[in-house]
Amino acid sequence: MNKLRVLITREEIERKVAELADELRRDYQDKHPILIGILTGSFVFMSDLMRKLNIPAEIDFIRLSSYGADKETSGRVTQVHGVKTSMRKRIKGRHVLVIEDIVDSGLTTRFLLDRLSRRKPASLKLCTMFDKPSRRVTEVPIDYLGFTVPDVFVVGYGLDFNEEFRYLPDLCVLEEQE
């Protein structure tokens, strides 16, 4: 049986999304960036961010996996679904912003940043809502950060455990009960 404890409230998340959108709007004004969300977890954050960003931007998604149904990364990243072919061709010379739900080990994010950088974008930056540096296996440059979280298993606001809990509007700690 699992128990949930709120770590970051929906109100705190809403305020942070607005702050990040303000910062991104200033940095990307007149740049028409390409935003690439890492599925599945980033879709809630990316949706909220896009509505507040209020600048012209193209969006696409990529689906990567390193967890499966476990609470620990497998250490192996696989691409389940890539960006559209037409988008891959348009990355060269463009400003690309990767949208991530959480940077944990850094393996998935590093995998994507390395792949995208080979396409020679004008700039490549990372915006993540949550960062868990205590779990980092490989360094990842985070350009825009919402919250740093402790070394606990979190769910909600798009993050899941075995495809459950994504619907929660708060970020919660998933605690096991005996």
Image: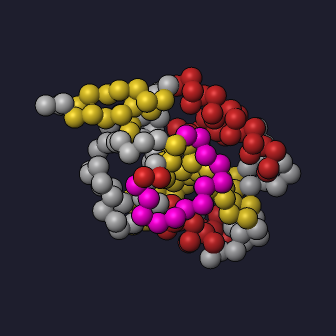
Residue 25 horizontal side relative to residue 69, left or right: right
Q: Residue at x 42, y 52 (%)?
A: 134
x and y, in percent, of residue 144 in the image? 65, 49
* Quarter where residue 46 is shown: top right
Quick one: 43 or 145, which is closer to the camera?
145
Q: Nearer the viewer, residue 31 or 1?
A: 1
**Residue 45, horizontal then vertical, whole percent:** 56, 39
Front one among 165 and 177:
177
Name the quadrant of the C terminus: top left
Q: Residue at x 75, y 42 (%)?
A: 23
What are the residue bounds of the magenta stretch? 135-147
Side of 73 where 31 appears, left or right: right
Count of all numbered marks drawn on residues in the image: 0
Q: Is residue 131 left or right of residue 15?
A: left
Residue 132's place in the image compared with 81, above or below, is above
- Magenta stretch contains residue 37: no
Quadrant into which the N terminus falls: top left
Kindly tell me whether residue 131 is visible in this rendering: yes
Residue at the image point whose x is 52% and y is 64% from the top: 139
Q: Is residue 145 magenta?
A: yes
Vertical side of 39 occupied by 170: above or below: above
Q: Position of residue 149 (x, y in %)?
A: 47, 41
List x then y, in percent, for residue 150: 42, 42
Can I make out residue 43 in this image? no
In terms of image quadrants, where is residue 96?
A: bottom right
Instruction: Report the magenta stretch's main SS.
Output: loop
